[in-house]
Image (tube, rainbow, N blue to C red):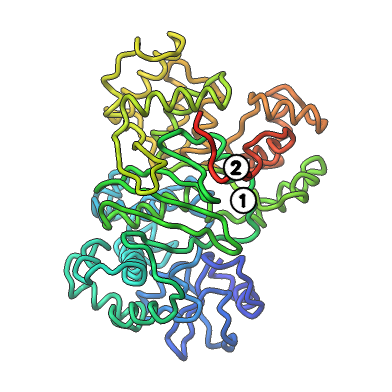
Amino acid sequence: MHTDTERCVRAVQSKDARFDGWFFTAVLTTRIYCRPSCPVVAPKARNMTFYPSAAACQQAGFRACKRCRPDTSPGSPEWNARADSVARAMRLIQDGVVDREGVPGLAARLGYSARQVERQLLAELGAGPLALARSQRAQTARVLIETTGLPMAEIAFAAGFSSIRTFNDTVREVFALAPGELRTRAARGRRTPGSPGVIALRLPYRAPLNPGNLFGHLAATAVPGVEEWRDGAYRRTLTLPHGHGIVALSPQPGHIDCRLSLSDPRDLTRAISRCRRLLDLDADPVAVDDQLRSDPLLAPLVDAAPGRRVPRTVDACEFAVRAVLGQQVSTAAARTHAARLVRAHGTPIEDPEGGLTHLFPTPEALAGLDPETLALPRSRRTTLTTLVAALADGSLRLEEGADWDQARTELAALPGFGPWTVEVIAMRALGDPDAFLPTDLGIRRAAERLGLPSTPAALTARAAQWRPWRAYAVQYLWTVDDHPINHLPVRGREDES
């Protein structure tokens, strides 16, 4: 979009927050870059130039605006809606792959050479993978500076910088303030002191957002010991590269309140990325709803509660295991099966609030389980153990940068994986916004009530007009049934079952 100057100028002059993250405005006279919705008086059109990423602005010598903080914009919805190599690369960079494995590791995951990846990212984003990772590193450092009391040296290495000098230089260059000045400014603006060991931040999103189906789904399917709904927040444990964490997420006007407790602050970038992915916060709900509203049978559902997101996952492997456990059983039964697996094979953790007890078991931890200990039909035991073995040995990779079509093919080749299991994993674990569940019982019931075709083949043909947002259509169709997944819990804490 950044190449359409006239459209960008109109968005900036109208301070349209829907375009935050789509492009960035760099002001030639002040050498500052802003988000489109920046509250300051819009500069003259001749003094504006536009970039596709914050990293490109920084490479061109612009610093972040202190008023609108463009570095905290929601991510571009393109990276979650597209399946090409650039979108896959961006999802992996956001997940911290460059910091952990370098550009060669990123390229290997994509199946390209490092030079090809560099060229593709430069052409579309105006910055290569190192510059994009550096921009993300700077934002991670800012969060740690402003929300924790960690010494600056610890923050530098936790954010991924190779030296304290590089950390200091980058923070000054990007934010025009020294690290100590950032902490002082944040302390002046903080109304209440933070809790020790807790990183508190706001996760932005594009309005509208309907929290009912998002948090209702997560709470209704929560695995006891790993997830819970407590005091208006969804809480869960996180397995991270350097340790573990606990996150509490609660919907607030204009943002999601996020409270993170991490055993190792180096995991902050990945934890934030996973939380944003879980809640589908980088979606463009206006574009989605406009497309679905064009169908007169879906329009009333969209108009009644716009802004529905697709509840996703913090760990694709975890969700794949849970999808198998949930085959042809109720939500309550799926939770029970998963809870047993967690108690037997999950890693115990300490939760200061007492509700969470375990990390969900990794594929490696489940690789040696005895199928006879599973209270499942024999065919489903085979399905689960085959899946776990494929995930553990790396022959099946369900990661942020996975090729959606290839992953579908590999999943479908496993015993016991039918269309429903493959598509629900594609929708919630892989993040494909066009995944569709025509065989789902709730979808078929909704189709009958709305006058849509009820057979899978006919419904799939009719749903072609909803593309590329069929996963969001699923969320609206599920609202036809009065199921707990569509509503925020009314109690302070969900009972474990």
- In depth, the one of 49 and 452 nearer the eye is 452
316 relative to 97, above or below: above
Q: Earlier in the sequence, mark 1 or mark 2?
A: 1
> Circle 1 sits in a helix, a strand or a loop, which is it?
helix
Whether residue 335 sits left or right of residue 447 in the image: it is: left
The x, y position of residue 252, in whole percent, is 58, 60
What is the x, y in percent for residue 406?
A: 43, 33
Q: Is residue 236 visible?
A: yes
Does dot 2 land on a helix, a strand or a loop?
Answer: helix
Residue type highlighted by circle 2:
Gly
Q: Residue at x 29, y 31 (%)?
A: 394
Query: In terms of depth relative to the viewer, which is nearer, 257 or 402?
Result: 257
Is 250 left, or right, of 381 in this rendering?
Answer: right
Question: Is the Cβ of the residue at disc 1 closer than 8 Å to that at disc 2?
Answer: yes
Estimate how packed mark 2 is, as few (under 14), some (14 to 19) or many (20 or more) residues with alpha carbons within 10 Å.
many
Q: Residue drawn 41% across and 75% down?
A: 57
Which residue was labeled with disc 1? 211
> From mark 1 to mark 2, how far is it between C-alphas?
7 Å
Q: Amino acid at mark 1?
A: Pro
Question: Residue 295 appears in which quarter of the rendering?
Answer: top right
Whether residue 45 is visible here, answered yes or no, is no
Quarter holding the N terminus?
Answer: bottom right
Q: Quadrant of residue 142?
A: bottom left
Q: Please name whichever residue, 312 or 432, is drawn nearer the observer in this view of the structure.
A: 312
Q: Residue 34: horizontal and vertical position, in percent?
A: 49, 77
Q: Farthest bottom residue?
A: 29
Residue 349, x across and y down, in percent? 30, 40
Q: Identify the residue under disc 2.
A: 216
